[in-house]
Image (spheres, rainbow, N blue to C red):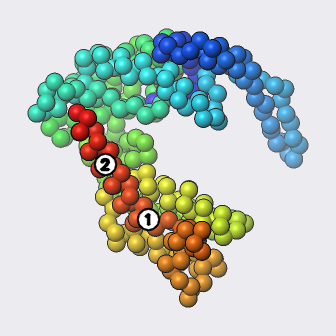
Amino acid sequence: DPKKASKKVTEEWPIHALRMYKINEKVIALLSTLMQTWRTRLHVNVGGQQYQTQSIRIERGIFQGDSLSPLWFCLALNPLSKMLRNSGYGYSLGRRPTVLVSHLFYMDDLKLYAKNSDQLQGMLELLSSFSKSIMMEIGVDKCTVLHAKRGKLERHDSIQLLNRAEIQELEPEKCYKYLGMQQLININTMQIKEAATATFKKWIKLIMKTQLNVKNKTQAINTWASTMLAYMYEVLKWSKTSLDALDWKVRATQKENRMHHPHASMARLYLPRKVGGRGLLNLADLCRGQEAGLLLCSYDYFLKK
C-alpha cells in the first residue's frame, strides 16, 4: 500500500510519465503550468475562533478533487505494472503454465502474487526501488504477507525491504481487506454479505434523518446506498429473495419516516419520475442488469480473442 501515494509523488514524475506516453507537448506544457498554480489554505476552528493560513503551494503529489487527476495518477504508476509483468515473476496457473499472474493493481492498492518466497522478495525489492525513485513511500504498516501451499496457510518469517523496513505476516485466523472485500484463501461470502447488508441499512437510516425532500432522498438512496451493493454484485452471488428483503426494508423505512404511505402503490415507487413514479431503483433488477453487462463484456472479450 503506497503511503498517501497521490500526495507523495515527486512533481517531475507525472510530467515525465506524460512524455513517456507521447502526449502532445502543448498539453504537457499546459499541465506543467497548472501545477505551478496549485494552492491550498488550511482552516482551523479552535474554541469557536476561525483561523486561516496563507496560501500554501502544493509542491509534491497530484492534485485531488478533479476528473483528470485520477487518470493522470494511474498513468504515473502504470510503469510499475509493466515492470512487474516483464519481471518474469508471478504465480503460474496449473493447466496453463505459460500464463503468469503477477499482480492486481487498482489505483494505489496493489496485490502481488509470487510462486515462492524468493520471487516475492524480488518483486518487493522491485516495488521498493521504483517507489524510492519517484519519492513515494510504502505504507509498511498497512501491508501484510500471506503464504499458502496447496490451499493451506503456512508460517514464514517476515520479509525485509531494501530500506530495512519489514512486512509482517498475516496473523493466524485473520483476514485482509482488498478493495473493500475481506479475503483470505477464499472470499468469505457470508461475512461480506452480512457487513454489506448492515452498512446498507445504516445508510438508509442516515438518509432518512436528513432534511432533504422526497425527490432528493430517493436520489440519495439510488446514488449512495444502492451503489454500495452494486459494487459487490459482480463478485458475490445474491439471491432474489435476499434482495427483495432489502427492498422491503427500504420501503418499510420510508413508511416509518412518512415518505411513503402504507396504502400507496408499491409499483409506483419503482416507476421513473417522468411517468409519475418515484424513481427508486429495484435492487434485484439492478443486480441482474449488472450481471448481464458482465456476461456481455466477457462474451465480447472472448470473441476478440
Could you tell me how many numbered marks the image carries?
2
Q: For the residue marked with disc 2, what is the amino acid?
A: Leu
Query: Among all residues in the image, which is located at the extreme left?
Result: 95
Q: Within 10 angstroms of label 1, few (less than 14), some, or many (20 or more) residues?
A: many
Q: Residue at x 31, y 20 (%)?
A: 85
**Based on the displayed image, in which of its 4 quarters is residue 113 positioned?**
top left
Query: Among all residues in the image, which is located at the extreme bottom?
Result: 263
Q: Give above or below for 225 relative to 64.
A: below
Q: Within 10 angstroms of label 2, few (less than 14), some, or many (20 or more) residues?
A: few
Per the image, label 1 sits on a secondary structure element best described as helix
Q: Residue at x 49, y 23 (%)?
A: 75
Residue that badge 2 annotates:
296
Q: Earlier in the sequence, mark 2 or mark 1?
A: 1
Q: For the residue marked with disc 1, what is the amino acid?
A: Leu
Q: Picture coordinates of residue 199 (x, y %)?
A: 50, 59
Left or right: 247 in relation to 193: right
